[in-house]
Amino acid sequence: MESTFHEVYYDVEQAIDLAFKGKFVLKFYDYLKVKGVLRREIEEFIESSTSNEISNLVRDLDDYLEGGDDSVHKQLREGYGHVPKPEARKIRNYLYGILEDAWKYSHDKRPGRRKKQPK
């Protein structure tokens, strides 16, 4: 299972790249369910550099969308200026959704959360 989980990191990295090309292909919660990811694995993902990178991208996009005249906002305009603000908003929401799906999946995988079998 460990080697399979490395595919998750690769797929998330690919999803980030595709998001900046306007393609939102990864429904992360469903993806995790299909892969049968364990709770400890999703916890590792939440603490990983990939998750941290997504958080930083979301923060940068928030600042870019906010705008401003200070040096930080000028740098963000240089970095993200090729992305129209409506598209930047979609990318930001998509990336934040990946993080939310990871948190939700981790929450749902807590011990004692098994679904009842129908009679």
Image (cartoon, helix red, strand yellow):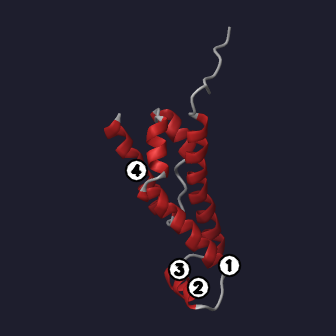
Q: Tag 2 or tag 4, which sits nearer the N-term?
A: 4
Q: Residue at x 48, y 44 (%)?
A: 43
- The residue where tag 3 is placed is 82
Question: Residue type at mark 2?
Answer: His
Q: Residue at x 34, y 38 (%)?
A: 2
Discs 1, 4 touching: Cβ within 8 Å: no
Quadrant including the C terminus: top right
In whole angstroms, how far apart are the C-alphas of marks 2 and 3?
A: 14 Å
Q: Position of residue 104 (x, y in %)?
A: 61, 43
On residue 66, the disc is 1
Q: Is residue 5 left or right of residue 22?
A: left
Q: Nearer the viewer, mark 3 or mark 4?
A: 4
In whole angstroms, how far apart are the C-alphas of marks 1 and 4?
A: 30 Å
Q: Position of residue 111 (x, y in %)?
A: 57, 29
Q: Tag 2 or tag 1, which sits nearer the N-term?
A: 1
- The residue where tag 4 is placed is 9
Q: Secondary structure at mark 2?
A: helix
